Image (cartoon, helix red, strand yellow):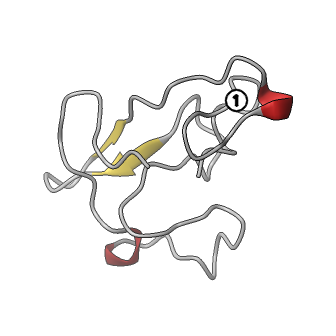
């Protein structure tokens, strides 16, 4: 599961931010993995500099039969990526 951004920065843990599993129960906010919980155009995460960056999550070729631990569907802006 991807936990670095396009530029190579490490992602922060989700429980270190205002986004929690209680607020977004279906977003899979585990550890420091890239997620798209808010409908942005791609999976992203928070970084140590106080901002956020998009992650290099590969797009799935056939979303219907994909393993969402390795890729994210373009149709859903990678919200299914786990």
User: At x 66% / y 31%, what residue is drawn?
Assistant: 77
* Residue 3 rendering spot, x and y as whole percentages: 33, 49
Q: What element carries label 1?
A: loop
The single residue placed furthest to the top in the displayed view is 61
Q: Badge 1 local density, few (<14 within 10 Å), some, or many (20+)?
A: many
User: At x 28% / y 43%, what residue is drawn?
Assistant: 4
Q: Is residue 63 above or below residue 36?
A: above
Q: Is residue 15 left or right of residue 42?
A: left
User: At x 69% / y 73%, what residue is drawn?
Assistant: 25
Number of numbered discs overlaid on the protein picture: 1
User: At x 72% / y 66%, what residue is drawn?
Assistant: 26
Q: In which quarter of the view is residue 2 placed?
A: top left
Q: In which quarter of the view is residue 32 placed?
A: bottom left
The residue tagged 1 is 73
Q: Nearer the viewer, residue 47 or 82?
A: 82
Q: Nearer the viewer, residue 31 or 23?
A: 31
* Residue 68 rendering spot, x and y as whole percentages: 65, 43
Q: Is residue 22 left or right of residue 4?
A: right
Q: In this view, does 78 lie to the left or right of 62?
A: left
Q: Is residue 13 above or below residue 40?
A: below
* Residue 48 rendering spot, x and y as whole percentages: 15, 56
């Amino acid at each position: 599961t991807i936990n670095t951004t396009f530029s190579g920065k490490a992602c922060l843990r989700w429980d270190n931010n205002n986004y929690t599993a209680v607020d977004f129960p279906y977003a899979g906010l585990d550890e420091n993995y890239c997620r798209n919980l808010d409908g942005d155009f791609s999976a992203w995460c928070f970084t140590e500099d106080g901002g956020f960056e998009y992650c290099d999550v590969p797009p799935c070729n056939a979303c219907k039969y994909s393993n969402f631990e390795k890729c994210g569907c373009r149709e859903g802006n990678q919200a299914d990526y786990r």
